[in-house]
Amino acid sequence: MLEQCERFEGDLAPLLAHPRRPPSRRALLALALCDVAVEFWVAQRLLIRSGMHTAALALVRLHFEATVGAIWLHHGASDEWLDRFAAPMAPGQLAEPVLGPNVDAMLQTLAKTAPPFLAQTLGAFKAATWQPMNSYVHGGIRPVVQSLAGGTPQQLVGVLQNGNGMALMTANLLVVALQDPALAGRIGPIQHKHRACLPPMQPPGT
């Protein structure tokens, strides 16, 4: 699975590195958060390959929140919020210029403003994994058990597949945000070629 993921990244990398001329401030900020999400995605796989599974699992939440945030920045954030978010910070200022809504609120907004499958897929992932994600991030029982007993190959394969699914969402957002005709039709062939290392497709209506 790690080798499949690396081939997937190799095909996705030229798209993620496409020269950027964001058409708006909104696109610029969303793409910057896409870059953050991609970094978490790559780091997670490197940690798994190095045997640092607990650290890799802790990154699941960071990757998920960065992905949701990037999509929300593009599809859901108000112009007023963007004004406050992009305002220059005073020297020495530590506090965020403006806090974003929580993940649930972002998903509720995306259900109204983004393509339906995005909010549905991200919402289903959150419902299934939020408590375990919190445990790993906040030092709960799951990372303790992971340290004592280790994980299973199936667990790690699932983590890799879900991470790849979110990376594909990030790449798709890049295509949408850049509005570059040269990127049209690039996502579908990559998704089809690498479906074995992506999350299983859910039947319609499930």
Image (spheres, rainbow, N blue to C red):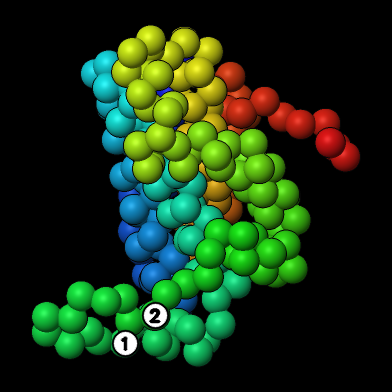
Instruction: Give the number of marks.
Output: 2
Q: Residue at x 38, y 41 (%)?
A: 137
Q: Looking at the picture, which amino acid does disc 2 mark?
A: Val
Q: What residue appears at the point 27 percent right and 16 percent down from the top-left corner?
A: 51
Q: Nearer the viewer, residue 9 or 109?
A: 109
Mark carried by residue 144: none
Q: Position of residue 127 (x, y in %)?
A: 66, 42
Residue 55 visible in the current orientation:
yes
From the viewer's side, name the closer residue of 180 and 122. Answer: 122
Task: Estimate the spatial distance between the alpha carbons at disc 2 and disc 1, rounded to whole Å.
Answer: 9 Å
Q: x and y percent of residue 70 in the render?
A: 48, 61
Image check: 43 left or right of 34? left
Determine which residue is flagged by label 2: 98
Nearer to the camera, 61 or 16: 61
Residue shown at the point (47%, 10%) measured from the top left:
153
How far across and how far down the image is residue 178, in percent?
48, 65
**In which image quadrant can residue 5 be found?**
top left
Location of the C terminus by quadrant is top right
Up the image or down, 171 lies above or below 151; here it is: below
Q: Is residue 45 above or below residue 122?
A: above
Q: Secondary structure at mark 2?
A: loop
Q: Of circles 2 and 1, which is in front?
A: 2
Tell me if residue 193 comes above or below residue 25 in the rendering.
above
In the picture, measured across the screen, residue 137 lies left or right of residue 172, that is: left
Please rate how many residues cluster around mark 1, counting C-alpha atoms within 10 Å: few if below 14, some from 14 to 19, many from 20.
Answer: few
Check the image and name the residue furthest to the right. 205
Q: Secondary structure at mark 1?
A: loop
* Residue of label 1: 87
Crowding at dot 2, Cα within 10 Å, few <14 / some 14-19 / many 20+, comes out as few
Specify whether 115 is left or right of 136. right
Circles 2, 1 touching at the beta carbon (< 8 Å)? yes
